[in-house]
Amino acid sequence: MRPSTNVPKKIGSIEFALLSPTESRGLSATKVITADTYDDDGFPIEMGLMDPRLGVIEPGLRCKTCGQKVGDCPGHFGHIDLAMPVIHVGYVKTIRNCLRATCRGCGHLLLTESEKGQFRARYDQYMVEAKDTGPLSKRIVKVASTAQVCPSCGREHGTIDVDKPTTFRENQHKMTPSEVREWLEKIPDEDLPLLDMNPEVARPEWMVLTVLAVPPVTMRPSITLDSGERSEDDLTHKLVDVIRINQRLQENRDAGAPQLIVEDLWELLQYHCTTYFDNQTAGIPPARHRSGRPLKTISQRLKGKEGRFRSNLSGKRVNFSARTVISPDPNLSINEVGIPEASARELTVPVRVHLRNFEWCRAMVERGPRPEDLPGGIYQPGVNYVFRADGRRVKVTEKNREEVAERLELGSTIERQMMDGDVVLFNRQPSLHRMSMMAHKVKVMPGKTFRFNLPCCPPYNADFDGDEMNLHVLQGEEARAEAEILMKVQENILSPRFGGPIIGAIHDHISGCFLLTWKNPKIAVEEASQVFARIGFRGNMPEVHREGPDRMYVYGKDMFSCILPKGINLRFRSNACPPGISDEEAIERDYLVDIVDGELLSGAIDERAIGAFKGVLLEKIARDLGNAEAALFLDRVTKLGTGYITMRGFTTSIDDEDIPDEAQRDIATKIQRAERQIDALVESYNLWQDPAVSPKEKEERGLQALPGRSLEETLELEIMKVTAQTRDGAGETASHFLGMDNPAVIMARCGARGSMLNLSQMAGCVGQQAVRGERIHRGYQQRTLPHFKRGDLGASAKGFVASSYKTGLSPTEYFFHSMGGREGLVDTAVRTSRSGYMQRRLINALEDLKVEADNTVRNTAGTIIQFTYGEDGVDPSRSVRGTPVDLAQVFTEAEKELKRKA
Amino acid sequence: MSEEPETVQVFNVLNHELVPVHEVLDEDEAKALMARYGVKEDQLPKIQVADPAARAAGARPGDIIRVVRMSPTAGKAVAYRFVVEY
Ligand SMILES: [Mg+2]
Ligand SMILES: [Zn+2]
Ligand SMILES: [Zn+2]
């Protein structure tokens, strides 16, 4: 069926109405007159805020209005008759518009007959076209409010101002809510549509309250604390305030108290009503609890992230889910997740009992909810509940398990505890892309954490410094099938973001494979066997070579070839390969990877081959041989990497950044030279201000401004250039003495962790610190710190850190470094909140679009958004880094095939 | 500001290299299009008659415009717009 004919329901229109005083009273089950809730014996007071006619919250009692029990009785509204009218805060803007656009004398819109006629005609046309009349009303208000006198009765029209939040002024004279109400009453029905109001359901004067509806007790239940004390809901507290002040106002007014006192009380009543609706109204202090906590009133219940909509309607708490700390386990497959036994026993999967699984189910029920482990500590699932065919639920206990098993019938459903192989969804917040929620297969294990293999860290953006993750157990066959096909980890190896792998080897996997393959080390047969045994490899040992009478070894590259699938051909340069070298040199230094039919002939395996984001070998396997093969390869490659690096040993420490004295001296010279260069630049800049220098000399020796730059900008640019060169130069000197025998360098070059920049900052020089991309300027008058002379533009006065992290920073350098670091922190903090909100808006706009079978992108109403998905119909996760076909690869393969045949 | 009279010769936006081809479909083409995608007019993306490109293409409300855009990934990308009054 076409999506257009498949829309289940369509909203024709929504009507917004106001509650009239009559309607409020009609809804009301009782009038509320006393501010007290319960009497001394703990019974609710009649006509109090907890009147039994407002609904029941105590179990066992029946509602005095509808006669139903707790849960069935929806609760019933009551009402408070306000002694004096009060403005409703939610409608202040609308009231203001009404007052500005109408006459106080006759209530008519301040428009001439012809204007009115024009707007009416426009309004009717809008209605025919089913167009939003909101903007039209805005225009009408704007036109009407400019009138000086009323065209209908000639009365002068004043300016209307609003004192936040609820006070109206006409020509600076305060209007009481009663006056406002009288004015609004005068506005004739036929003028209301032009003010965007429907007179059939909303009269403007209803925006000034004379009756306050009291919500049912069911939406503001009181709770009994452990101490036996009653604690009332925030709304009840607020209503108590309203009633108290209302009573006092009434008494004072009836007793003929002075106008001043009545007005004060009236304003107080207005305050309480305002905060009852919205306790975060601008311009008034929020009402507070005795403890100082602001009250949560109606608006606060609904608004924002913790409000009813976002927290309880769009998103809910769910059953069959678990959350705990995560930790790594390199022995699991990437498709698996380790679950603590305690969670497995609590989370269940429903299984329908039928002929073919009857005995299996019966045996499981008989084991009960706490089965003993099999010999060897092997976990066995039990059963928590049995749902009988008649719908009755039976809890399985140690006591009744045998009896329940005996009585088990076909057609029942058992709620079985989780067991190995169950499909679950695993999720880490923030869920920024679809890989944040993937399907894993369960493996129940001892311990209290969720565990998964490290290649799954990048898609979840997880680390193990205390991160927690959520897990959801799938409850139906369809859900399980769908999750396995669409959401399983292996199905997400290739990211839809850039068409390359997002799941891949990281850190030690990369170092390990690099050490195993680079320059083809000889590995003793015993050690190779150890590594292979560790990874559970079954297959032929690579070719064994002999050296002397009793040394037998295999080559590292051959070991790696063992786990490479057959039929893979690939040529690329390693990550460790320095840029700009010739193919010959790359081969010579073993940086050109050549794989022929699954044999690694040359080159080192590193981040470029197997890493997350960059790994082309991994990508090739996933694309050509399928996701299952890629998952298997990834499982093996990670184990091989960690296996080898564990056996070989690998460590890094602070003395990895030690450089000889001559290098230190060299770096010091370079820094001195830079300082001299900068001083020279500053001097040539200052020359312009020197009155002792002749204009001619200034032209000759002064700093020349770059095109389109001021002299100051030029100076800064030149200095930045020098400092950058200096840092790079120091890095070069340092890295000259840090070769591939250095573990830190190995990690940086093969892409496992860290960069050469990090190393040169540790060994050589940290370099220029910047705030907003410029050298550091702010601080005291004309200087950054009191340690420098005013107007000093030299290197160290403007944030150049000549020390290295290893030698340590001087106090001023440390201060500048902190300034640069702080900027980074602030930027990330600002970026995350901003991009989060941006993403929320995007998702809300796009969430229900989908690609239909004919490649169009449509929304739920069948409206076409794109005629072909993404204009080209390419699924990025099935593309080669964005392009549909990698032609170069196709040609080389075809060429090879031709050669083979010839 | 100089007070020149409005130039009679209006610049045709469709001749600009950055503006994609806009052409009005005839009745048969429009019918075929809607049959192909199984949609009613209001389920197509919309374009205002007042849109400079639609005006240049001589479209009237109720017409369907074919937009052929050069795309870096797809070569030619074709889209359709239903012409509306506002
Ligand atoms: Mg963390
Ligand atoms: Zn009831
Ligand atoms: Zn009037």
Image (cartoon, coloured by chain):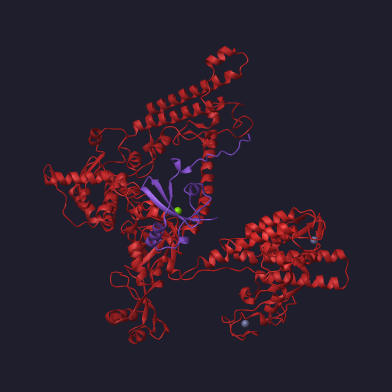
Q: Is residue A766 above or below residue A711?
A: below
Question: In terms of depth relative to the viewer, which is nearer, A882 or A205?
Answer: A205
* Residue A476 pos. (x, y %): 37, 72
Please state if A167 lies on the left or on the right of A877 as rendered: right
* Residue A37 pos. (x, y %): 70, 77
Residue at (55%, 20%) from the top-left corner?
A683
Q: Quadrant of the N terminus of chain A?
A: bottom left
* Residue A778, quarter of the rendered image: top right
Which chain corresponds to the colour purple? B
* Residue A52 pos. (x, y %): 67, 82
* Residue A651, quarter of the rendered image: top left
Residue A793 seen by the camera: yes
Residue A494 seen by the camera: no
Please state if A619 lies on the left or on the right of A430 as rendered: left
Q: How many marks?
A: 0
Question: In terms of depth relative to the viewer, which is nearer, A551 or A740?
Answer: A740
Q: Quadrant of the C terminus of chain A?
A: top left
Which chain corresponds to the colour red? A
* Residue A363 pos. (x, y %): 30, 80
Please state if B85 lies on the left or on the right of A614 as rendered: right
Q: Is residue A877 above or below residue A267?
A: above
Residue farthest toward the front in the current orientation of the protein: B8
Question: In terms of depth relative to the viewer, which is nearer, A154 or A178?
Answer: A154
